[in-house]
Image: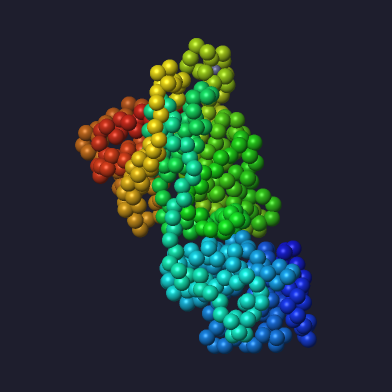
């Protein structure tokens, strides 16, 4: 069944036709959108419908052979005949076969240029048009359309204006954990009293994230285009997203869903980027448990009566929390009962903590630390180190679907994490002594791998394992 926007297409098209002085069709036209069982939504069918109607009515010449089957076209037509940008254009464009070109609204030109990333599509063209008239003149061979792909496309990673790491005083351990999280894509939990910089540190992380791969840009641009969030300029997504979510967030807004066609949630918008949850225990238990599947698999399944949809959600979780309701557990200032502290910490379930590779405490700064000088440019240096570590991972995982160390599947840790003999002894000692779960033992190996990558070492050394242990088990020790 066509939904509202498709039914209204005829009204918009008729309006545009009269504006262009195109007479009413002498014959009645029946449009059959097959298959009937597939739900049609959105206004992208306007342009192909208009061209078809004119051809059927004999008002547009049959296409010359060189143009037949050569084009895929889509776009919304305004009442004055203008072509309007539509959501989801890149996903539609990806339906083009090799050798086919695209005729698209001018506003969709930039994202559609990413079609070049699809194998076999190096020779295709993207022809932007501002009005229906331009498209009709093209088919009447009255004028030409410009191929937007003639110019080589260069993707520049755009850096978010983030707080510089050099501006954050003290908290060496938490800063180091943040660098490791960025380098290996590891989830990070910051535990500390209020006002000691948890949110500040989280807001510095975007400044050190590694560049997006081309395939990651395509995936993200398809997602942001589908939800209509590409921004006013319609440019492709070229940097890793950071999504900050409040604890009052609804389930569909966080994981996806909603009424009608399921929409992607924040975890999908944070794909290849960072999802930041402040005040973690304030989130409902149900909400936090819903994060377990995507944290494990990098995907979220949304099941409906009619169909089951899957969205990608390989994000890095950065979460912050106080250690207790008053925020000062572990110091003289804490006014909480032991029971209260336990209850508060238990709001974060063991299985969720099991999926957070790095867990570090932040403590109040000493007076010396509070007055220590800050410096600029620290994030630039750290970002370069993060990028080198990520480049090693891209090489390591070439030809697999693994995106970073944090995503090494449980059963394959031994394939990717090679230890020196003394490092392996250290690893075994920690795993045996603390009788940790297999999941935690795997986390220890993955984090050690990232620390070795940051040190430009192919083999994991004992010092890497020891540092990983220190940054992993502060909170929720088994
Ligand atoms: Zn307290």
Report how many numbered discs are placed on residues in the image: 0
Taking the image as shown, residue 311 lies to the left or right of residue 172, namely right
Q: In this view of the protein, which residue sits in the foreground, 394 or 257?
A: 394
Residue at the image position 33 percent from the left and 50 percent from the top: 391
Residue 403 appears at what percent x and percent y?
40, 50
Residue 355 appears at what percent x and percent y?
46, 38
Q: In this view of the protein, which residue sits in the foreground, 373 or 61?
A: 373
Residue 308 shows in the view: no
Residue 477 appears at what percent x and percent y?
43, 26
The quarter of the image holding the C terminus is top left
Q: In terms of image quarters, where does ligand 1 lie? A: top right
Name the residue furthest top: 332
Taking the image as shown, residue 96 lies to the left or right of residue 166, namely right
Residue 363 shows in the view: yes
Taking the image as shown, residue 185 lies to the left or right of residue 234, namely left
Quadrant assignment, res 368? top left
Residue 222 appears at what percent x and percent y?
54, 58
The quarter of the image holding the N terminus is bottom right
Residue at the image position 42 percent from the left and 42 percent from the top: 208
| Picture layout, residue 75 above or below residue 226 | below
Residue at the image position 41 percent from the left and 29 percent from the top: 374
Q: How is the image coloured?
A: rainbow
| Picture layout, residue 211 above or below residue 122 | above
Residue at the image position 40 percent from the left and 26 percent from the top: 373
């Amino acid at each position: 069944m066509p939904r509202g926007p498709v039914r209204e297409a005829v009204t918009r098209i008729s309006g545009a036709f009269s504006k262009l002085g195109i007479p009413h069709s002498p014959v009645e036209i029946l449009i059959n959108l097959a298959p009937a069982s597939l739900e049609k939504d959105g206004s992208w069918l306007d342009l192909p419908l208009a061209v078809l109607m004119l051809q059927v009515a004999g008002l547009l010449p049959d296409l010359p052979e060189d143009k037949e089957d050569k084009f895929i076209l889509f776009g919304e037509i305004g009442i004055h005949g203008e072509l309007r940008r539509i959501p989801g254009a890149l996903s539609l464009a990806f339906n083009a076969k090799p050798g086919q070109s695209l005729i698209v609204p001018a506003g969709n030109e930039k994202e559609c240029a990413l079609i070049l990333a699809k194998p076999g599509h190096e020779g295709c063209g993207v022809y932007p048009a501002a009005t229906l008239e331009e498209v009709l003149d093209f088919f009447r061979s009255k004028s030409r359309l410009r191929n937007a792909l003639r110019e080589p496309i260069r993707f520049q990673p755009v850096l978010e204006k983030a707080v510089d790491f050099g501006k954050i005083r003290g908290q060496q351990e938490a800063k180091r954990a943040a660098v490791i999280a960025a380098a290996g894509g590891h989830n990070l939990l910051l535990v500390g009293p209020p006002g000691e910089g948890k949110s500040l540190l989280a807001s510095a992380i975007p400044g050190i994230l590694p560049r997006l791969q081309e395939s990651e840009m395509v995936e993200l641009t398809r997602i942001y285009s589908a939800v209509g969030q590409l921004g006013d300029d319609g440019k492709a997504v070229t940097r890793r997203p950071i999504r900050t979510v409040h604890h009052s967030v609804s389930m569909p807004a966080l994981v996806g869903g909603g009424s009608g066609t399921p929409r992607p949630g924040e975890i999908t918008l944070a794909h290849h980027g960072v999802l930041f949850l402040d005040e973690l225990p304030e989130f409902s238990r149900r909400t936090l448990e819903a994060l377990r599947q995507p944290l494990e698999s990098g995907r979220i399944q949304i099941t409906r009566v009619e169909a089951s949809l899957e969205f990608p959600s390989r994000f890095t979780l950065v979460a912050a929390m106080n250690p207790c309701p008053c925020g000062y557990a572990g110091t003289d200032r804490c006014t909480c009962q032991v029971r209260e502290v336990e209850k508060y910490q238990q709001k974060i379930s063991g299985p969720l903590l099991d999926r957070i590779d790095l867990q570090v405490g932040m403590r109040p700064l000493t007076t010396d630390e509070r007055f220590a000088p800050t410096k600029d440019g620290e994030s630039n240096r750290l970002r370069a180190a993060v990028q080198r570590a990520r480049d090693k991972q891209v090489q390591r995982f070439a030809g697999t679907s693994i995106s970073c160390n944090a995503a090494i599947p449980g059963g394959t840790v031994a394939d990717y994490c090679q230890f020196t003999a003394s490092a392996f002894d250290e690893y075994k000692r920690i795993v045996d002594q603390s009788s940790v779960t297999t999941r935690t033992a795997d986390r220890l190996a993955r984090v050690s791998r990232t620390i070795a990558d940051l040190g430009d070492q192919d083999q994991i050394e004992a010092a890497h394992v020891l540092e990983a242990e220190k940054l992993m088990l502060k909170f929720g020790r088994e």
